[in-house]
Image (cartoon, coloured by chain):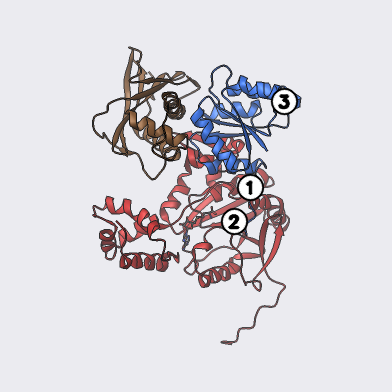
């Protein structure tokens, strides 16, 4: 049983249009594996039958998109960026924000929330007394956002990169799962946000984690997102990408600073902005 | 009588799914619900004593126990022979993992026993009653995970 | 780097052996805490111990307290790998000197990520 070329084309167009995610030819097996459970649930004989239904059913489309997104994540993913957070970004921002004593952080494409809560743990440990911080966690998938709000994780998820000392400090048992403390939950706010569409009204962020999501987009979409990011990162703030993601040829917009194995991106304010040739 | 005298079926199901999904391959998931008559080839049990007292057991048909063993030992070729000793060891570890996680569902602290494994059925103490029973199928064959408590 | 795998189940030792061998460790095995201590006393001192909790003869918790009582073995990293998953048990193991704690069932990634946290495995530098 394999997905037919027209069905595959429909699904990859849908994903591209709604989330900018690319499912190139060769990814048929992936699409099929992810849609098969939905096809069965909907009582369709096979994935092609299900795609026929998708064409006219927006509710099913939303479900299919949810199933197609790759949500792979872990606590303190890759470790080094979080070291850079504690050692470089946090001290720099604490020095720069002493007048407001508040930090504003964005976990863009937060998946099930491990990134946002990892940052919340570090803030709990390292933010000076009397300071507050707010972490905005956004994703295109409302299923994922509901998981962030619930703050509950399975045993297998808990094992993935969470130091045991943090487990005992911040989590309690909830049936077969673990639930994060109310204090950390209060630091994190969720909002649905599609990175490939124009941003809604957002505050300015001191630190943005935009990790392991640009890889799913084509070059033009990546560039567009990074340009728009430039508008919401504070001039003295930081942007962090995934370890396999770079700002490509956007050096005009972003300066890069290396901290160990981690690349920190900062808005380029010292370089001249290219002069717009169109419009006045 | 405490409110929480037995774990919920949903929680037990989640525990078993995680153990299965992690060590026995996700390509062939565990299917909930009875999958025909179970002819017990191997079974294993652990007991929990302390704040909560109970018995967690797993019963499998012989060929499934052999397949579990092959997967845990990393013998990919379905034809690799497995000795009874290997099967007893693997099925014991299976119930140890499930039992340990079931223990955490209940108020603690409690102690987990070492697994008892038998070709055929393990003999349960006469004063226990079944509190929770998970019927499932794997590769078309049935298996049962159950939790017994002292009456 | 050497890892000593301490678990009474051969199947579990096999899973752990495959996982850490892949990460570049040489392995040594023991079926309980006493056998593991015998290795250490015979001079086979590893960089890392992966330790089950419930075992016959000597359990993993006792093993940890014994290792911590000997200053010669201070350099060994101790990681529990066990189905014991009560909050209080994890606290106890850490207080006794365990550096990390992995709850069974685990994926191979989980072991690798914990060893990265402990600085025992370097993440390959991305291209
Ligand atoms: C691989 S996860 C990355 C999670 C986390 N940032 C990390 O590094 O571990 C990718 C996430 O991007 C989300 N995503 C995909 N397309 C998106 C879009 N157009 N806008 C916002 N989020 C998107 C997915 O729903 C998924 O949760």
Q: Which tint is chain B?
A: brown
Quote the CA–CA distance across marks 3 and 1.
Answer: 43 Å
Q: Secondary structure at mark 2?
A: strand
Dot 3 and dot 1 residues touching (CB under 8 Å): no
Query: What residue is shown with label 1?
Result: A123
Which chain contains the residue that carries disc 3?
C
| Chain in red on the image | A
Q: Nearer the viewer, mark 2 or mark 3?
A: 3
Asked if the residue at label 3 sits under 8 Å from ligand 1, the reply is no
Q: Nearer the viewer, mark 3 or mark 1?
A: 3
Residue A25 appearing in the image: yes
Q: Nearer the viewer, residue A275 or A27?
A: A27
Residue C65 appearing in the image: no
Local packing at callout 3 (Cα closer than 10 Å; few below 14, some 14-19, many 20+) is: few
Q: Which tint is chain C?
A: blue
Dot 1 and dot 2 residues touching (CB under 8 Å): yes
Q: Nearer the viewer, residue A22 or B40?
A: B40
Q: Secondary structure at mark 3?
A: loop
Local packing at callout 2 (Cα closer than 10 Å; few below 14, some 14-19, many 20+) is: many
Which tag, 1 or 2, sits closer to the chain's start? 2
- As drawn, the label of residue A105 is 2
Location of residue A197 in the rendering, given as x and y in whole percent from the top left corner: 47, 68
Q: Residue furthest right?
A: C72
Query: What residue is shown with label 3?
Result: C43
- As drawn, the label of residue A8 is none
Give the left or right position of residue A38, taking residue A211 as reference: left
Local packing at callout 1 (Cα closer than 10 Å; few below 14, some 14-19, many 20+) is: many
Q: In the image, what residue occupies the spot 54% across and 38% down? A: C18
Which chain contains the residue that carries disc 1?
A
Give the left or right position of residue B123, taking residue B86 as reference: left
Q: Is residue B4 above or below residue B14?
A: above
Q: Secondary structure at mark 1?
A: helix
């Amino acid at each position: 049983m394999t997905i037919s070329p027209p069905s595959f084309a429909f699904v990859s167009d849908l994903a591209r249009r709604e989330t900018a995610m690319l499912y190139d030819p060769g990814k048929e097996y992936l699409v099929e594996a992810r849609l098969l459970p939905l096809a069965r649930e909907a009582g369709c004989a096979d994935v092609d039958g299900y795609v026929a239904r998708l064409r006219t059913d927006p509710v099913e489309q939303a479900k299919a998109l949810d199933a197609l997104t790759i949500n792979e994540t872990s606590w303190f993913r890759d470790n080094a960026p979080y070291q850079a957070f504690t050692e470089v970004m946090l001290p720099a921002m604490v020095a720069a924000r002493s007048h407001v004593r508040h930090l504003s952080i964005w976990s863009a494409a937060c998946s099930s929330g491990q990134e946002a809560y990892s940052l919340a743990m570090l803030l709990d440990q390292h933010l000076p007394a009397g300071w507050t911080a707010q972490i905005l966690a956004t994703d295109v998938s409302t299923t994922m956002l509901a998981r962030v709000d619930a703050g509950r994780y399975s045993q297998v998820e808990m094992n993935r990169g969470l130091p045991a000392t943090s487990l005992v400090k911040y989590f309690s048992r909830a049936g077969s799962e673990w639930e994060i403390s109310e204090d950390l939950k209060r630091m994190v706010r969720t909002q649905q946000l599609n990175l490939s569409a124009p941003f809604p009204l957002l505050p300015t962020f001191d630190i943005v984690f935009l990790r392991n999501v640009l890889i799913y987009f084509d070059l033009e979409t990546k560039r567009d997102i990074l340009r728009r990011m430039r508008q919401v990162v504070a001039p003295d703030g930081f942007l962090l990408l995934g370890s396999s993601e770079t700002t490509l040829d956007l050096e005009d917009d972003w300066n890069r600073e290396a901290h160990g194995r981690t690349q920190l991106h900062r808005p380029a304010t010292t370089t001249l902005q290219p002069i717009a040739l169109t419009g006045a | 009588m405490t409110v929480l005298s037995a774990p919920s079926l949903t929680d037990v199901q989640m525990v078993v799914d995680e153990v299965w999904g992690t060590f026995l391959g996700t390509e062939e998931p565990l299917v909930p619900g009875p999958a025909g008559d179970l002819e017990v080839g191997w079974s294993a049990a652990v007991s929990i004593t302390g704040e909560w007292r109970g018995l967690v057991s797993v019963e499998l048909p012989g060929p499934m126990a052999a397949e579990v063993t092959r997967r845990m030992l990393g013998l990919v070729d379905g034809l690799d022979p497995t000795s009874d000793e290997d099967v007893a060891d693997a099925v014991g570890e299976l119930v140890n993992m499930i039992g340990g996680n079931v223990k955490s569902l209940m108020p603690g602290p409690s102690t987990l026993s070492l697994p008892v494994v038998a070709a055929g059925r393990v003999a349960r103490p006469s004063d226990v009653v079944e509190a929770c029973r998970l019927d499932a199928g794997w590769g078309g064959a049935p298996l049962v995970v159950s939790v017994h408590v002292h009456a | 780097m050497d890892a000593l795998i301490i678990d009474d189940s051969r199947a579990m030792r096999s899973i752990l052996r495959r996982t850490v061998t892949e990460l570049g460790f040489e392995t040594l095995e023991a079926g309980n805490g006493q056998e593991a201590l015998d290795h250490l006393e015979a001079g086979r001192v590893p960089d890392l111990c992966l330790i089950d909790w419930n075992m016959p003869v000597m359990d993993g918790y006792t093993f940890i307290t014994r290792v911590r009582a000997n200053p010669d073995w201070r350099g060994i990293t101790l990681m529990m790998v066990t189905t014991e998953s009560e909050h209080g048990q994890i606290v106890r193991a850490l207080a006794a000197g365990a550096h990390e704690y992995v709850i069974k069932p685990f994926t191979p990634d989980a072991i690798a990520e914990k060893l990265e946290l402990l600085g025992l495995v370097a993440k390959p530098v991305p291209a």
